[in-house]
């Protein structure tokens, strides 16, 4: 049983090393701070709380976070702390190239160093867009000072001509309709504004909503945080309450290492199955676990998620959007239902300092079509399927709830794309030798190969297949897929092609077998043939020679362990290595 014993208060805090004395250096630290108009009694030994903000106008999903930061600050002041807001690298999904994922580890490094180097006793992590939540959690976990997440919240529902328009999901659907000739370009342009009608992150159960849910399920955010729409006044209340709470967490010395236990990760994996969460959560949770030293593996995802029913009826797996999830009761309802079914470690503690069960046990479900009873689940076996075989010795993942049931067992002829540019150059070619029974294979899109592991695994289908009314084919790659996307898509194939994995040597015409029930992904060639091809293989592109991209290339690890940098795994604590003061 998890048990947390609060520390005694008052006691000397970390920030007093900077502010709590009369030496030249103490005066130096305080005096410069006072140029912001801070009264002297704010340096009396009270908790100094960082508000770590991923606000950026280049990250539109987080563009409202300065307003929320003010609400957090109100709460911190009210509880007797000193709030100090600071910016960190903001990895915005919609605009960053080559892909925001290439910058998750950079942002995590920024957060870690900012927390350790500054006079902070605790931190509120303001996140929203996909990578910002895991980056902040990774950085904070490596420093291990009291930390709490408040999410920016999802956008309001999109509506277009009477239909819900889900962020991302509608974009993929409409672009396929354009290719199939069933939607006009003018209609597509008109739908553009309808997709994004308020502040906030994607309104589907995409990666942003999934990671906000993961933060809550892990116990790193206040209960109910994940689903409140960005523009709902209750989002501001949540920020305010989070500000109050972090001050008490510092007094109690309640740290990420107290909360992010093996039990917490197991809860999160099961919650991910129940919400039909993004495959990206696999990578991010493995990376966070690596920071806190919890031995989490890909196989845990399969074992723990296998018998979890997907009960949240949200796009891309279902019908509704985050706004309706909030009105139905949000994540606390899902956690209550998991607990009642014996699928939750009820005594895992959260930022509240109390068992997580205490927060959720009495909540009601206000809409049983949005959060379904288990006997009317969207998918009886949700979760993430982890596939293995000679094509993925270290594993690959697939999301059954987003797949087409009859394709979950499939044997087909490989049509191989040697990279994303090759795919783009040939996919619309009417002479491409492909039909709906083929298996599309995309190489060199993994963490090292792309670089950054772009969300291109859900390759659009060829127009000549789409025109037949076919909406799904088996696709295999070492890439990721947007949490808003769908299809029978095998992702994160490891080792990736650029690290010499078997994916690199698949050829046009090879037969591939996918058997999700038996968790098998098999390239139907002999062991000798596979070994000979691998012996002949060499990396097609030269490694980058300078800049961050070189650091990334040289140190990123495989998707099967979270794609963190090798030198960033683990918790390095809050002690400043060499203090010049
Ligand atoms: Fe930012 Fe989806 S693009 S949350």
Image: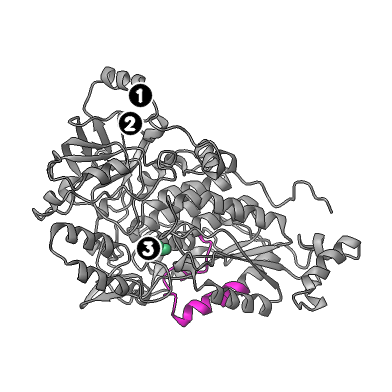
First-in-chain label (2 vs 1) = 2
Looking at the image, tell me whether mark 1 or mark 3 is earlier in sequence order.
3
User: Which residue occupies the foreground of this view, 254 or 510?
Assistant: 510
Of residues 344 and 334, which is closer to you in this image? 334
Q: Residue at x 25, y 61 (%)?
A: 377
Front residue of 462/265: it is: 462
Mark 1 vs mark 3, CA separation in Å: 52 Å
Which residue corresponds to mark 2?
Answer: 504
Magenta-highlighted residues: 218-244
Within 8 Å of ligand 1, the CB of disc 2?
Answer: no
Mark pair 2, 1: CA separation? 8 Å
Q: CA distance from mark 3 to mark 2?
A: 45 Å
Mark 3–mark 2 CB contact (< 8 Å): no
Q: Secondary structure at mark 3?
A: helix
- Provide residue 275's location: percent of width, then percent of height: 34, 61
In the rendered view, tell whether residue 576 sits above or below residue 58. above
Q: Which mark is residue 340?
A: 3
Q: Are marks 2 and 1 in contact (CB under 8 Å)?
A: yes
Q: Position of residue 215 (x, y in %)?
A: 49, 60
User: Residue at (52%, 58%) from the top-left corner?
Assistant: 348
Is residue 218 placed above or below 537 in the rendered structure? below
Q: In the rendered structure, does residue 223 fall within the stretch colored magenta?
A: yes
Label 1 SS:
loop
Residue behind mark 1: 537
Task: Classify mark 2: helix, strand or loop.
Answer: helix
């Amino acid at each position: 049983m998890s048990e947390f014993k609060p520390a005694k208060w008052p006691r000397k805090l970390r920030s007093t090393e900077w502010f709590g004395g009369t030496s030249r250096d103490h005066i130096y630290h305080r005096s410069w701070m006072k140029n912001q108009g801070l009264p002297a009694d704010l340096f009396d030994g009270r908790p100094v709380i960082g508000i770590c903000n991923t606000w950026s106008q280049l990250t539109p999903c987080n563009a409202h976070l300065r307003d929320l930061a003010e609400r957090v600050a109100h709460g911190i002041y009210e509880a007797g702390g000193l709030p100090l807001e600071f910016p960190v690298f903001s990895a915005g999904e919609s605009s960053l190239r080559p892909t925001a994922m290439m910058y998750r580890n950079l942002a995590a490094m920024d957060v870690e160093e900012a927390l350790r180097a500054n006079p902070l006793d605790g931190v509120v992590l303001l996140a929203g867009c996909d990578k910002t939540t895991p980056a902040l959690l990774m950085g904070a976990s490596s420093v291990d000072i009291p930390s709490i997440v408040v999410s920016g919240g999802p956008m309001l529902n999109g509506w277009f001509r009477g239909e819900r328009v889900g962020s991302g999901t509608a974009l993929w659907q409409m672009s396929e309709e354009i290719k199939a000739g069933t939607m006009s370009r003018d209609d597509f342009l008109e739908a553009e504004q309808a997709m994004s009608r308020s502040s906030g992150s994607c309104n589907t159960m995409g990666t942003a909503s999934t990671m906000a849910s993961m933060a809550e399920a892990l116990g790193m955010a206040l209960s109910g945080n994940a689903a409140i729409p960005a523009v709902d006044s209750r989002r501001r209340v949540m920020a305010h309450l989070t500000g109050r709470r972090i001050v008490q967490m510092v007094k109690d010395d309640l740290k990420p290492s107290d909360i992010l236990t093996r039990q917490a990760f197991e809860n999160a994996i099961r919650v991910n199955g129940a919400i039909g969460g993004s495959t990206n959560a696999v990578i991010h949770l493995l990376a966070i676990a690596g920071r806190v030293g919890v031995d989490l593996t890909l196989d845990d995802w399969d074992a723990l998620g296998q018998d979890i029913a997907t009960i949240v009826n949200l796009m891309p797996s279902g019908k509704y959007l985050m706004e309706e999830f909030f009105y139905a009761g949000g994540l606390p309802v899902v956690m209550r239902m998991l607990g009642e079914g014996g699928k939750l470690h009820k005594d895992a503690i959260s930022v509240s300092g109390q068992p997580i069960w205490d927060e959720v046990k009495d909540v009601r479900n206000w809409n049983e079509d949005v959060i379904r009873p288990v006997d009317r689940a969207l998918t009886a076996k949700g979760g993430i399927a982890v596939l293995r075989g000679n094509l993925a010795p270290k594993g690959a993942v697939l999301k059954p709830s987003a797949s087409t049931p009859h394709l979950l067992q499939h044997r087909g002829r490989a049509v191989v794309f040697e990279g994303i540019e090759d795919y783009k150059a040939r996919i619309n070619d009417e002479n491409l030798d492909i039909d709906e029974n083929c298996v599309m294979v995309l190489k060199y899109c993994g963490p090292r190969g792309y670089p950054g592991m772009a969300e291109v695994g859900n390759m659009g289908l060829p127009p000549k297949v789409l025109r037949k009314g076919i909406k799904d084919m088996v696709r295999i790659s070492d890439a990721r897929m947007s949490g808003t996307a769908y299809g029978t898509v095998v992702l994160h194939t490891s080792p990736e092609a650029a690290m010499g994995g078997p994916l690199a040597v698949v050829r046009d015409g090879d037969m591939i077998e996918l058997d999700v029930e038996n968790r098998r992904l098999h390239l139907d060639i002999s062991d000798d043939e596979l070994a000979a091809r691998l012996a002949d293989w060499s990396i097609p592109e030269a490694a980058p020679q300078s800049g961050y991209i070189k650091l990334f290339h040289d140190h990123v690890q495989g998707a099967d362990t979270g794609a963190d940098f090798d030198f960033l795994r683990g918790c390095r604590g809050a002690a400043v290595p060499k203090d010049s003061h």
